[in-house]
Amino acid sequence: MSPASNAAGPFCRRLFLPDEHIERICREALASVELLPESPGPVRIDRFIFLSFGFEEEYKPLPAHIMGCAKFTRNGLCRIIVNQDLAEQDDTVSRVRVRSTLAHEAGHGLFHTPLFIEKLERDAMTRLLDNGEGIFDSVSNEGFMCRAEAGMTEVPKFEWWEYQANLAMAALLLPLHLVVEAARAHLPKVLSGTGTFETRVAAAERELATLFKVSRRMVSIRLGKWWLDQATQPSLF
């Protein structure tokens, strides 16, 4: 059976999550533990994991292409592990990637725990583990194995759980209303500063990335066409 022919992947069912649902659940999850910032700034994602799931993240040796993983038992999410080599690199890019990895794995915890519990219960009942999981490199018998950070859409189309975890990662680290608020402060310079429009947008996005402690790429994907919309309809600002 090819991945494309098995819409549920290794799980008992496919989970359909509208983007707006992911946004709302992530915002409510941050607010529920009082970690939704009141003004633009970095989300304390490590603290969010502890308060939401009851454990601290771990840093362990993992294969070089694996940034992190989420482990489950039939009681739910039990561990989030980050590649130790990544965590030991003391530079801005690595620190940003650690934060994005933590948020990605937390996204699995928020949205995919019921799916994995169902999978573990099914496997325990049938003991027929050779049911196609091997074709999905991101799923093991006990959790998700997540590769290097990519854009929110840059995962195989049939790995819908990774796409959803990437959307959750962005929603947790960059609550949309806060990103837009911060972007508005840069808008006058973007609309009328020196240089090309693209270079002004890039400069603003780099500053937003520093403010939220994420990659500029994530900011750019998160805002999408927002800058262009403001430039073409300045009267709405």
Image (tube, rainbow, N blue to C red):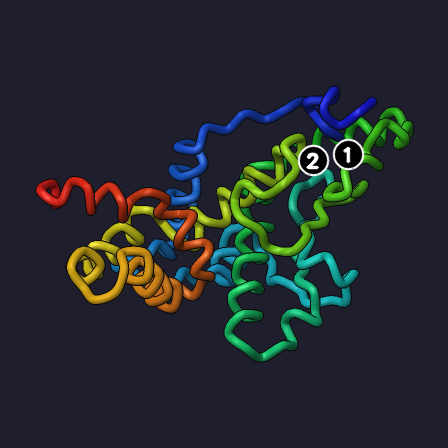
Residue drawn at point x = 33 percent, y = 47 percent: 176
Q: Which residue is drawn at 52% across and 44% down?
A: 152
Q: Mark 1 points at which residue?
A: 120
Badge 2 density bin: few <14, some 14–19, many ≥20, Cα 10 Å: many
Farthest-out residue, front = 196
Residue 79: in sight, yes or no? Answer: no
Query: SS class of the residue under badge 1?
Result: helix
Q: Splitting the image into 4 quarters, where does residue 113 fall?
A: top right
Q: Looking at the image, which residue is at 70% across and 71% down?
A: 85
The spot of residue 64 in percent (x, y) is 76, 63
- Tag on residue 79? none
Residue 139, percent across and down? 75, 41
In the image: residue 23, left or right of residue 120: left
Residue nearest the observer in this picture, 119 or 10: 10
How far from the left and from the top, in percent, is residue 83? 69, 64
- The residue at the far top in this view is 5
Which residue occupies 66% across, 42% down? 76
Q: Pointer 1: residues within 10 angstroms few (<14), some, or many (20+)? A: many
Q: Report helix, strand or loop for mark 2.
A: helix
Query: Looking at the image, do the residues carrying marks 2 and 1 touch, with CB atoms under 8 Å apart?
Result: yes
In the picture of the structure, the residue carrying the numbered disc 2 is: 116
> Percent x, y for residue 126?
88, 25
**Amino acid under label 2?**
Phe
Identify which residue, 183 or 168, lies in the foreground: 183
